[in-house]
Image (cartoon, rainbow, N blue to C red):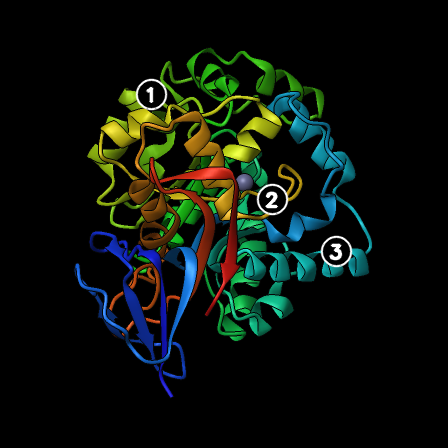
Amino acid sequence: MSRKISAHYVFPISSEPIKNGIIELDESGVIINIINPGKEIKEIAGVEFYSGILVPGFVNAHCHIELSHLKGVVVEKTGLHNFITQISRVRIADEETILKAINKADLEMKKNGIVAVGDISNKNHSIEIKKDSTIHYHTFIELFSLNPDKAKTVFESGKKLEKELRNNDLSCSIVPHTPYSVSKKLFQYIFNNATKNTNPVSMHNQESVSENELFINKTGSIFRSLSNMGVDFSHFKPTGKNSLESVIRNFKKENKCLLVHNTFSCAHDIAIANEYFDEVYWVFCSNANLYIENRLPDIPLFHKLKQKCTIGTDSLASNHQLSVLDELKTIQANFPQIPLTEILKWATLNGAEALNLSDKIGSFEIGKKPGINLISHINFEKMQLKPESKVKVLV
Ligand SMILES: [Zn+2]
């Protein structure tokens, strides 16, 4: 039995919104037809009609599900350097607490209409839950160490985790944590391991102004905080350039690259990334940026420069919830000039493309199985989200 679902508007994402559009699905959730009723709405048998808009399942392009037990633990709005110090202090917990929190986070994302996640992992805690979840996870195995003497050991631990994930049929890639926490030697191991044109890679990028300061002249709060924590910067040489430009050649340019946060990225950084990478995706985690640095990236600049933007929730250590819709509401409230059609694309099709999933999800197109989310409480006059907008998973 097929199912026909309709609402005030259908947003296919890959094409213009359809007023009173109808999506027809087969019993497995694959789209078999998209109907534009045109001006004359005629009665079609068996249509379920909902108040609101229909959008494809969301893609959360950046999360750390294994940090879910740290919800509410870190003090808000104290800056990235303080966040790092606090996380390293509180991260340790018993395995049962960690696993319970991961399971709860997976269910929360499902309920919030998320169908795919780009998830950062340092450990293997999330494997069992990812394996059984209906959410598609791509795991970014994240490595860090500034000590070149430890590069080989750190890389080998990443390879071990990669093997474990692959043995469980979970897609993954080994990636650097940030420009400032990876030695040149470790970057080289990661570079040599990356297979061209296959898996996407990712890195936290310019989340704090002090990341650029460190690379420009070896000063700033990240340099001070990490030095106080005992991190040895004796091998670190400032480049006189912003962090991204300083490390970009440590990536294979053919691999899709997801740069995360970009709170202090400027037009020059955007130009550098576009010049270097075949495909670059910018991930915005607005609520986490407000949580940690109390500042948002220059999102309208990325929009103006027609960049491929995506949406991430980051972890529950730096967010109150794992909800792509809540991220969109923050963007809409702060930058109402960016159209809803555009930010919905960031939350669906762009994320699917970044994670190599756009043949299955990300848009309403015949043959895809993207899931269907109903967003209710829409401001139809301005075609915008409202603070009270809600998401409900229909398929
Ligand atoms: Zn992160």
Q: Nearer the viewer, residue 24 or 136?
A: 24
Q: Earlier in the sequence, mark 1 or mark 2?
A: 1
Q: Nearer the viewer, residue 153 or 204?
A: 204
Observer able to see residue 285: no
Observer able to see residue 310: yes
Q: Position of residue 387 (x, y in %)?
A: 52, 37
**CA neighbours of label 2 inside 10 A, class few (<14), some (14 to 19), many (20+):** many
Seen in the picture, residue 329 relative to 13 is either above or below; the reply is above
Q: Secondary structure at mark 3?
A: helix
Q: Which residue is mark 2?
A: 315
Q: Is mark 2 within 8 Å of ligand 1?
A: yes
Q: CA distance from mark 1 to mark 2?
A: 25 Å
Q: Which residue is mark 3?
A: 98
Q: CA distance from mark 3 to mark 1?
A: 37 Å
Q: Earlier in the sequence, mark 2 or mark 3?
A: 3
Instruction: Confirm or deny contact between disc 2 and disc 3 (CB under 8 A).
Output: no
Q: In percent of the image, x 65 and y 30: which residue is there?
A: 84
Q: Position of residue 173 (x, y in %)?
A: 44, 56
Q: In percent of the image, x 72 and y 36: which residue is there?
A: 88
Rendered-image quarter of ligand 1: top right
Q: Secondary structure at mark 1?
A: loop
**CA neighbours of label 1 inside 10 A, class few (<14), some (14 to 19), many (20+):** some
Instruction: Confirm or deny contact between disc 3 and disc 1 (CB under 8 A).
Output: no
User: Which amino acid type is shown beneath numbered disc 3?
Assistant: Ile
Q: Which residue is mark 1?
A: 266
User: Which amino acid type is shown beneath numbered disc 2?
Assistant: Ser
Q: Nearer the viewer, residue 252 or 389?
A: 389
